[in-house]
C-alpha cells in the first residue's frame, strides 16, 4: 500500500498495517475487516428462530496478512501483544482469543473448503465483552483472511453459518446466527431485519434525523460463563413443553393456553421471546415509515421485558437506560447484546446528539462512580477486503 492509501484508513487499520510491516519486514498482501454490531431490538430471539434488527457499527476487527505457502497459521494480536500459531492439519482446542481463529478454520474445513496457511496481525476497536459482538467480528475477519489465501466462494449466509458453528461447537457459546450474519451481510447506512429461520435479511434505514448512540456501562460479560447458555436451554425446554420445534412456532395465545405446562420461569422466558418477536417486526415497520418516537417506544418495552421476564440486565444496564431516557431528544433506550453487562443502545434526535452523550456520561458517573464509554455509531458495511495486492 502507498503512504496515501494507508493514511486514508481508519486509525486502527493504519495501526494493523504498521504492526505487520514491523513484525514481518514486508508489505501485507491483503487487509480485511469485519464490523461489530449493535442490536437495535430483537434480543435472545435469534437462537429461537425469531426476528432481530441489528446494525453493523463503525468499529471493526482488522487483519493484515500474507500467505505462507504452508499449512500453518501465525497471527499476532496487536492489542494484546500475543502470538497464536496453529497447524491446519492438527487443530487442537485450547483457551483464549486464538480459539475463535481455530474454530473458524475448523468450521471452514468441515464445510469442505481447502485452506492454506497465512501469517498476519489482527487488531480492532470493538470493545471486548461490551455486547457489541467482538467475537463475531473476529470470526468473520478470520474467514475473510482465509478467503484471501484459499480462494473459496464467499457467500453471506454460508460464512455466517461458519462463524456461528465456530462459536457454538468450537468455543462453546450457544449463540444464534444474528451476530455473524450482520457482520458479514450489513448494508452501509441501514439496519437489517433478519428472519433467523429463513435467514432472509432486509435493509431498513434509520428514521430521518436520528442517530444511534452506544453507551458502554463498563461492566463485562462472557457468553460462555454468564447465564446465556442457561437462557437458551430454558427456551428450548419451554418450546418442548409447548409442543413446538422452537419458540418461533408458538404465539402468545399458544403460550397462554399452555401456561399450566410451564414453570413460572419458563413461562416468563417464553413470554419475552414471543413478545420480542412481535416488537421487532413492528419496530422495523415503524423505522421504515420514519417514525422515531414509535420505534423508541418498542425499544423501551424491549428493555422492560429483558429485565423482568428474561432477567438478563444488571444494575448498571438499568441505570444507564434510566440516564439515557432522562435526556432531551432520546426516543428510546435498551440493553443490547446478551446481557449481564455490556452496553445500552439509544435512538436519539440528531440535533441532540452532541450534548446527549456527555450528559448521560455525567449522570451515570454520578450514580455509579464509573466513567462510561460512549460512541455515536455510523451504520457500516459488512465484512470485506479493504485492499489486496495484484
Image (cartoon, helix red, strand yellow):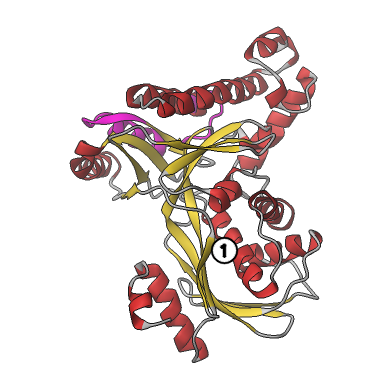
Residue 314, magenta (yes or no): yes
Which of these two is toward me, 189 or 40? 189
164 vs 137, left or right, is: right
Q: Residue furthest bottom?
A: 25
Residue 295 in percent (x, y) is at 39, 26
Residue at image location 38% in from the left, 36% down from the top: 206
The quadrant of the image that shows the C terminus is: bottom right
In this picture, is 335 found above or below 365?
A: above
Q: Is residue 105 visible?
A: yes
Q: Secondary structure at mark 1?
A: helix
Splitting the image into 4 quarters, where does residue 287 fall? top left
35 vs 117, left or right, is: left
| Mark 1 neighbour density, 10 Å: few (under 14) some (14–19) many (20 or more) | many
Magenta span covers which residues?
307-332
Residue at image location 34% in from the left, 34% down from the top: 347
Splitting the image into 4 quarters, where does residue 16 fall? bottom left
Residue 355 in percent (x, y) is at 18, 42
Q: How many marks?
A: 1
Residue at image location 64% in from the left, 66% down from the top: 101
Q: Residue furthest front?
A: 390
Q: Is residue 96 visible?
A: no
Which residue is identified by label 1?
Answer: 141
Which of these two is toward me, 287 or 237? 287
217 vs 176, left or right, is: left
Residue 28, magenta (yes or no): no
The quadrant of the image that shows the N terminus is: bottom left
Residue 124 in percent (x, y) is at 45, 65
Which of these two is toward me, 197 or 300? 197
Residue at image location 74% in from the left, 72% down from the top: 115
In this picture, is 174 found above or below 100?
A: above
Residue 364 in percent (x, y) is at 28, 41
In this picture, is 209 found above or below 266?
A: below
Amino acid at each position: 500500500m502507498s503512504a496515501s492509501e494507508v493514511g486514508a484508513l481508519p486509525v486502527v487499520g493504519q495501526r494493523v498495517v504498521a504492526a505487520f510491516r514491523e513484525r514481518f519486514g514486508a508489505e501485507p498482501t491483503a487487509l480485511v475487516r469485519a464490523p461489530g454490531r449493535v442490536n437495535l431490538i430483537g434480543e435472545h430471539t435469534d437462537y429461537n428462530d425469531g426476528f432481530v434488527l441489528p446494525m453493523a457499527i463503525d468499529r471493526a476487527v482488522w487483519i493484515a496478512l500474507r500467505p505462507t505457502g504452508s499449512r500453518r497459521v501465525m497471527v499476532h494480536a496487536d492489542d494484546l501483544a500475543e502470538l497464536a500459531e496453529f497447524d491446519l492439519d492438527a487443530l487442537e482446542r485450547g483457551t483464549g482469543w486464538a480459539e475463535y481463529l481455530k474454530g473458524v478454520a475448523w468450521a471452514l474445513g468441515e464445510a469442505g473448503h481447502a485452506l492454506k496457511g497465512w501469517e498476519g496481525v489482527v487488531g480492532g476497536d470493538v470493545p471486548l465483552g461490551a455486547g457489541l459482538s467482538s467475537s463475531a467480528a473476529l470470526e468473520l475477519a478470520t474467514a475473510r483472511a482465509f478467503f484471501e489465501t484459499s480462494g473459496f466462494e464467499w457467500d453471506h449466509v454460508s460464512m455466517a453459518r461458519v462463524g456461528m458453528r465456530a462459536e457454538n461447537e468450537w468455543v462453546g457459546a450457544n449463540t444464534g446466527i444474528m451476530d455473524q450474519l450482520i457482520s458479514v451481510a450489513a448494508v452501509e447506512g441501514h439496519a437489517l431485519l433478519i428472519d433467523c429461520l429463513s435467514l432472509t435479511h432486509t435493509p431498513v434505514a434509520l428514521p430521518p434525523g436520528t442517530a444511534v448512540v452506544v453507551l458502554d456501562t463498563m461492566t463485562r460479560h462472557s457468553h460462555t460463563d454468564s447465564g446465556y447458555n442457561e437462557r437458551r436451554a430454558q427456551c428450548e425446554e419451554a418450546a418442548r413443553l409447548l409442543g413446538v420445534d422452537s419458540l418461533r412456532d408458538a404465539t402468545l395465545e399458544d403460550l397462554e393456553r399452555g401456561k399450566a405446562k410451564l414453570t413460572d420461569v419458563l413461562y416468563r422466558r417464553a413470554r419475552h421471546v414471543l413478545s420480542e418477536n412481535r416488537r421487532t417486526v413492528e419496530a422495523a415497520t415503524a423505522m421504515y415509515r420514519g417514525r422515531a418516537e414509535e420505534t423508541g417506544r418498542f425499544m423501551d418495552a424491549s428493555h422492560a421485558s429483558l429485565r423482568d421476564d428474561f432477567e438478563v440486565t444488571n444494575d448498571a444496564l438499568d441505570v444507564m437506560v434510566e440516564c439515557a431516557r432522562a435526556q432531551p431528544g432520546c426516543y428510546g433506550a435498551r440493553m443490547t447484546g446478551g446481557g449481564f453487562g455490556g452496553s445500552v443502545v439509544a435512538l436519539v434526535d440528531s440535533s441532540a446528539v452532541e450534548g446527549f452523550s456527555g450528559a448521560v456520561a455525567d449522570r451515570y458517573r454520578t450514580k455509579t462512580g464509573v466513567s462510561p464509554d460512549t460512541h455515536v455509531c455510523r451504520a457500516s458495511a459488512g465484512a470485506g477486503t479493504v485492499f489486496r495486492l495484484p
